[in-house]
Structures are given as structure tokens and as C-alpha cells.
Image: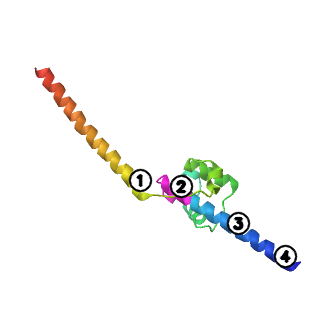
Amino acid sequence: MIKIDKIIRRIIGESMTDIRNLLAQNIKNYRKIRGFSQEMLADKAGTSLTHIGMIETSKKYPSPQMLEKIAIALGIDTPELFTTHTVTFMPNYNKSIERLYQDITVDFRQFEKTVIGRIKELRED
């Protein structure tokens, strides 16, 4: 009987560890995808930086209420924090989007100057 109890506790303990690690990794990845620091997420979720850090390193398991606050702060549904799909932070992708935005802004400014210049030319004629 004692051996079965130990085995059950070990299985439950390991599965809880896996869930905690999955949750921690998903929170961290969603936070990075959103461009939030731990401090920003803590502010948005109404908790401390230390608490978020402990959750992201699997040292603390958040309450259901805190899970909901974190999910809302991240702009996702709470069950998404427990999904096993790969949520990754792609800094190169984010930098590419930022560069594209800058290029579009530069192109638009050049276009704007060209249009204004052409309008001025037409007024002079």
C-alpha cells in the first residue's frame, strides 16, 4: 500500500511540475511576444515584479484569479496559458516588422514631399 501511495504522489507531482513549467513558459513567451517586460506585465496584472518572476521560473503557481488577470493583461483567454502548442518569441521577426514600418514611414514621407512639391508646381503654372 505504501509503495502505491508513493508512486501516485510521484506521478501527480511530476505532472503538476510539467503543468507549472508549461504555464511558466507560455506566460513568458506571450509576454515577450507582446513586448512586455516582467514589470509591465506585473503592472497590468496588478501584482509584483517578484511574483511574475517566480511564476515565470516555475517557483510559484498563480491562483486562478491571478491566472485570469495575467491572461487579460496578455490579451488572451486563460486556457491558452495551458496549451501545448508552441508559442515562441521571435526577436528577428519582430525586428523585421519594425524595420518594415520604418521603411514604409520613410517611403510615405518621401511620397508626401513629392506630392506637395508637385502641388506647388501646379499652383505656380
- What amino acid type is highlighted by mark number 1? Asn
Q: Which residue in the protein does label 1 denote?
A: 94
> The magenta stretch spans which residues?
27-39
Question: Is label 1 in a helix, a strand or a loop?
Answer: helix
- What amino acid type is highlighted by mark number 2? Tyr
State which tag comes first along the sequence, 1 or 2. 2
Q: Position of residue 25 (x, y in %)?
A: 57, 62
Disc 3 + disc 1, Cβ < 8 Å: no
Disc 3 + disc 2, Cβ < 8 Å: no
Q: Which residue in the protein does label 2 denote?
A: 30
For the residues labelled 4 and 2, the Cα–Cα distance comes to: 39 Å
Screen quadrant of the N terminus: bottom right
**Mark seen at residue 16:** 3
For the residues labelled 4 and 1, the Cα–Cα distance comes to: 50 Å
Q: Is residue 51 above or below residue 68?
A: below
- What amino acid type is highlighted by mark number 4? Ile
**Mark seen at residue 4:** 4
- Name, please, the residue furthest toward the left: 125
State which tag comes first along the sequence, 4 or 1. 4
Question: Is label 3 in a helix, a strand or a loop?
Answer: helix
- Taking the spot 38% from the left edge, 49% from the top edge, the residue there is 97
